Image: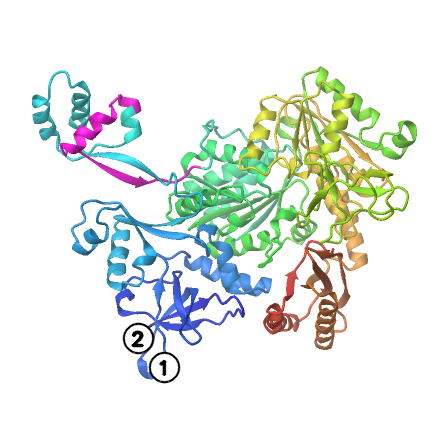
Amino acid sequence: MKLAEVIVDVPTMQTDKPYTYLIPNDLKNQIAVGSRVAVPFGNGKRKVQGIIANIVNKSEKDMNFEIKEIDKVMDLNAVLNNELLELSAWLAKSTYSFRINCISTMLPSAMHAKYKRVVNLLDNNITDKDIINLFKNTKSIDFSEIDSNKKLLNKLMKLQKENKVSLEYLVNDKANSKKELFIKSNITSAEAEQYLKKVRKNSTNQQKLLHLILENDALEIKQSDLINRYQISNSTIATATNKKWILKKQVEVYRNPYKSTVSRNYPLKLNHDQSLAVNKIAKSINDHNKDVFLLEGVTGSGKTEVYLQTIQKALVNGKTALMLVPEISLTPQIVNRVKGRFGELVAVLHSGLSKGERYDEWRRINEGKAQVVVGARSAIFAPLKNIGVIIMDEEHDPSYKQDDNPRYQTREVAKWRGNYNNCPVVLGSATPSLESRARASKKVYQLLKLPRRINNHKLPNVNVVDMREELAKNGQEDFSEPLLSAIKQRLFKNEQVVLMLNRRGFSSFVMCRDCGFVLKCPNCDISLTLHMDTYSMKCHYCGHEEPIPKVCVNCKSRKIRYYGTGTQKAQKELLKLIPEAKIIRMDVDTTRKKGAHEKLLNRFGNNEANILLGTQMIAKGLDFPNVTLVGVLNADTSLDLPDFRSSERTFQLLTQVSGRAGRAEKEGQVYIQTFNPDNYAIQLAKQQNYEKFYAREMHIRHEMNYPPYYFTIKITANGGQEQRVASKIFEISKYLKAKLNNTDIFLGPSPSSIAKIKNQYYYQIIIKYKNEPKLNECLQFILNYYQKDAQKGLYINIDSEPLSFM
């Protein structure tokens, strides 16, 4: 008996234990590990989706229970290869989540629950009567209408392997432009010559078409090209079709997320440090080593060129390459660099693509038509085979950590895939995470340094402005006199300015000056933010929106004041102070639409504006040669957070945004406005001295028992009834304290920093430990046992190595 071990997707009670199903005789030679299937579950009446994790052979006498058959196969070929299946098992264990959730994360959303599957006929010359009848008067059929017919399914699987049919997943935005009409010659050159003699002399279009077939009797061309390039009319095409000279056929085409022309670029001459880095990584590629390199390079030191030449080394060796960037906003510039170097070999994966585009890019990778993948966090699961190098740019960035299940750290997944493929992983940053830098210090990672900017250009001069003095002097809390003066000078010279304020909206909160009442979100434990573009108060957590109050809802006073500054208010204020300024604002509100990031950056790159004002999305990766001034309007935003990483994040952000200035021939200047000018993170960012910051911060972490000296686990409970949530987290805490070492450090149980979000109350426990052999067993028990509470609306989540304790 041929049996499949299936990981099933049961919404109520998940399990990593595979269930065994009989593979029907009709599918024995076609079904594969990694295929999605529908199987009967429980009493057999209920059908659930699953994925085949293994196929085994057993005799009937070995089976001591009744085996149910696989009901349907969901695909004509496997959707996960062996590497990704193994990765899903590791990911489930390391993130304390269920394997089916990990598998779902790896697949494009077009393969999730809501889609329509169709089978397309690609070859009109099929002779099988069943298939001819199936596609009678149509080129596409609904897969769900035939997925129970095992005889037909078997034939379709064979035809797909021969590229005569294709299975397609239609999502809302996918159906309109998924195919293009092609014209194919149906006569030989000799026949075309005979027809030419019979065509009337004034039928010039028919003559043109026959001459084309004469020159190429295997002619296959887009109908649009035939019309536009060769000026052959629709009526001529219709006549030729009727005369059986040509055949029309719909050909499935891939969507191209980057349709604009990308300028070709060529390898640049490397300096000594770059050459050393490329050569060391290339040797690791050639030797199939699993090395992890930490490429620590100051901003503007040419890390991207090191990445590109490293990718080239992998491709020359017949390998593929994966390059990750942290933000969607970085993707357009990076993609243009990579596509300009490697052309059609490049596929792009990030959440800014439509579902159809993302699915098509995933298919290109899965079918081996793309050898280089560029993308954000989830691109780490790209179905690349034979990987030669994995690159993580800005490896310190917090967006590489997934917030929802499975709560994976992309860096750890990259290392797993590097280990599986016997290839190096390159972690690049001007300000590496303390964890990565500590591993490099202990020789776990190989440290490669780029200490100088390209062509030895100077790092920008950084000035710290004490906003306490500015506020006392002229009452200005947004734009200091030194920064304003510097902006005016740059605009006079036709140079460009980047201004960062890490807070969107018009004002941080609205408060009554009489009674001190602050308008809060009714669903979340957080104040509402004023947005003047929509004249409303918005919650940035749940999306709640309400009108701006004219009177205090608490005491009915009209003394309402707006406190704090967001990007909208900063833009309005700056236009008052410098009316001639042309400002592009870049934040979540202005980049909601697809392609908005690229359009805004292109406008700035084309000098349509002289000031780019934005949140932290403009801090990294942007490279504009005419930017000579960077201003940080409030450096204290991240510094004031009650979190042990706040100093590290502040230093990283300030160093990164400072690096946007003076990247070409012109010298750069930076102004950092702060109410905490003496803070060590701000002073060391001014000096751009990462090594000194690393040493000081590591000392503080050691004294306070924080990572990387301790491992950490965060367990969170959330639900709609606060008392039940608190009771459950205390119950879990009691269980863990009874099981674990008394040397472990427990923080909590306590309410989370934001105790209520979307009408859900949050409580948490933090565990800090160095060596805890029983912890994994205890957490696996919690994962499985407390599933029963999810059915009552109370959820338990486990986060290994959380980036924040908030």
- For this orientation, the residue located farthest to the right is 472
- Neighbours of disc 1 within 10 Å: few (<14), some (14-19), many (20+): few
**Is 250 left, or right, of 393 in this rendering?**
left
> Is residue 206 rendered magenta in the image?
no
Q: Residue at x 44, y 35 (%)?
A: 342
Secondary structure at badge 1 equals: loop
Q: Quadrant of the C terminus?
A: bottom right
Q: Horizontal and vertical percent for residue 75?
A: 36, 57
The type of residue carrying mark 1 is: Met
Residue lying at 35% horizontally and 69% vertically, measured from the top left: 70
In this rendered view, identify the residue nearer to me: 445 or 748. Answer: 748
Per the image, the residue denoted by label 1 is 63
Vertically, is 329 above or below 36? above
- The amino acid pointed to by label 2 is Met
Residue 76 in sight in this render: no
Q: Secondary structure at mark 2?
A: loop
10 Å crowding of disc 2: few (<14), some (14-19), many (20+): some
Q: Position of residue 347 (x, y in %)?
A: 45, 41
Q: Nearer the viewer, residue 687 or 124?
A: 124
In this rendering, is residue 370 above or below 10? above
Q: Which residues are magenta?
A: 228-256
**Would you say the residues marked 2 and 1 are in contact, meaning their CB atoms lie under 8 Å apart?**
yes
Q: How far apart in space, not on screen, are marks 2 and 1 (Cα)? A: 10 Å
Identify the residue under disc 2: 1
Question: Is residue 156 rendered to the left or right of residue 563?
Answer: left
Q: Quadrant of the N terminus?
A: bottom left
Asked whether 588 or 262 is in front, the reply is: 588
Q: Residue at x 17, y 23 (%)?
A: 206
